[in-house]
Structure formats: C-alpha cells, structure tokens
Image: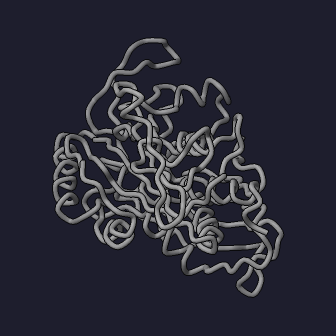
Amino acid sequence: MNTIGHTFKVTLFGSSHGDAVGCVLDGVPPGLIIDIQAVQREVDLRRPADGIGTPRREADVVEIVSGVRDGRASGTPITIFIRNENRDSDKYKRFKDVPRPGHADMTQVSKYGQCVDIRGGGQFSGRMTAPLVAAGAIARMLLSDLGIEIAAYTTSIGKVVDVKEHSIQELIAQAKKNDVRAANEEFAESMRREILEACEDNDSVGGVVSCICDGVPVGLGEPFFDTVEGELSKIMFAIPAVKGVEFGAGFRAASMRGSDHNDPFVVVDGRLRTAKNDAGGVLGGISNGMPITFRVAFKPTASIAKEQRSVDRTTMEETDIKIEGRHDPCIVPRAVIVVEAATALVLADLVVRGGFVD
C-alpha cells in the first residue's frame, strides 16, 4: 500500500526515473493557510550538498495542482507534483538479472515480475521522500497552530557521535545552517570528514538521526495498536535505509533497573511533568506532555563503487558486480528533513483523530 494515515493521510505516486513523483494529501482541514514558499523551502533542504551528496541535481519544483484555493486548503485532496528532470537510466538495466547487494532489486523483481520499474530503485528509491517532505510541510502548518514544534538533527555519522544534549530551540536555530544537519558546525566538520573518507574508499557510511517533538499535548495516541510509538515507527521504517527506531532511553532501558528508568512525576509551573524523560514523552502509547524523543538508525548507502559479489539470476551463477551511477556516500544529512516531515504527518493524523483540531 502506498497510503499511510487514517484521517490525515498521504498517498505517494511516481518512481525515481519516471516522469514525476508526487502525493495526494487527504484530510487537510478546510481553511488551513498553505504557504507554498514554505513547502518549497522544506523540499529544498532535502537536496544533496556539494561534495557529500549525489551528483544528481533535481530542481524539485513543487507544484500544487489541486486542493488549495487562494492560499487556503479547500477541504478536498491536495495533489502535489514534483517533476523528474535529471535522469540517467541506462546503468540500471542489468540489475533485474544481477541484483545489487543491499538493494531491493531481487525482492521487487521476485514480487512484481519483470515488468517492474527498477530504474534508480523505482518506487524503493529515496527519491520518493521528496513528496513526503512536501506533504510533511503542510502537516507542520497544522501542527504549528497547536504550538507543536519538531526538530531533527544528525546525531552520528560512522564513528563520529554527538552525545551532547541539545534543546529544541538550539536545533531549530543551528541544525539547518550546515550541510550535514548536525547540531553545530564543530560536529558537522567531523561528520563531513567521515563521509569524505568513506567516499575516498569507494564506500559509504551510515548514521543516526535524532528527533524532538515539543508542545505535544497530553493524550495523543490511539491504543491498543495505533500508539504514538507504533505510528511513528511505521512511517520511519517506510523511509528507505532505516534499520532501527528507539524512543527515550531505547535499548539502554534493557540494562536499567525500574528505579532508574521510571520518570518521577513532578509539578512544574502548576503542570504535571516528569523529572527526566527516559520514557521519551510516551506512556502506554499515549503522549504524556513531555517532549517526544526518538532516534532513527540509517544503514550505509547500498550503492557503492567497490566491486561486490552477486548472482546472475538467468544462469544462477555467482558473479561480480560494480555499481556505476550517481549515489550519496551517506544518506543521513538528507534524511533529517525527511524524519521531520514523516513525524509531522503522524502527529497531524493523531491530533485530528484525537479531536485536538476542529
């Protein structure tokens, strides 16, 4: 299925090397102010940086072709269109027979047959996150009316790890000022070197994106199954290259005692809060009023210039494969805005379902 969400939902269409990618966003409350320039700015943040990103350059001009009139949502589905203009598909022909290690070539051909479009990864490409970011920008407009803020940043690239605590105000002010989307320029420079070193070795590197959601009201989430963590995890795992998601203390909680992990309740400015936030802002699958915090792990980019082993499916013999083309040595910097957008879509759906929006 290419649709996610229950009331505020998005459907993706297109493919990496097709004519366009896009989405249909349904459930946007009529009258919501839609700032197309703000949508374009968000999509522009996803574009690759010089030196540490793919040489493929797309204009990524956002076209809203329905659902918005005179700068406001009309209440009908909003259709977003982003054209693919810089395509080089010749190098992908052989991958139906000789699948690339780490890619979905083998699985998508096995599932959909020889008619599947695997150029540039087809619909399994990171290219599909461009319309996701555009839809997320509109979701953020809804959330901003409720005082909900979302900020993500690069926590680690390879061996370089940022273990410092950062406020959401610091991240909003700093993380998008550098091309690695790190919390500050000091970490950005170290992470940039890590990416370049992998690139010099004809290799790639992964990393972690952390996200903070502030101003989330108490009571968000629809247990038993549509919990805050469950809904966020589902959309995060739809982002290409994501291999792990953890909330609050995450896997560290497994080595803690209950007395250490439990967050004591306190009163702050007349409001019920917790003294710390190992729960990540969620109890019983429902937001507790503290910031929602989580981390998303991204694997190294699968397309690398090193020679690798594969199998020719036509002969069922092992063979060598060398991937050519234009690829990111590290997808993490571009994924930061995608994590923010995906988070906004989930929270927008939950606030509408929970009755927090008229």
Q: Quadrant of residue 203?
A: top left
Where residue 28 appears, as percent x and y from the top left, is 75, 67
Which image quadrant: the N terminus?
top right
**Can residue 20 be seen in the rendering of this structure?**
yes
Q: Quadrant of residue 116?
A: top right
Vertically, is 96 above or below 27?
Answer: above
Which image quadrant: the C terminus?
bottom right
Where residue 51 appears, as percent x and y from the top left, is 25, 60
Q: Quadrant of residue 232?
A: top right
Q: Residue furthest bottom?
A: 70
Where residue 41 appears, as percent x and y from the top left, is 49, 75
Residue drawn at (57%, 50%) of the image: 288
Numbered-mark total? 0
**Can residue 119 be seen in the rendering of this structure?**
no
Where residue 303 appears, as percent x and y from the top left, is 37, 39
Q: Is 337 on the left or on the right of 68, as rendered?
A: left
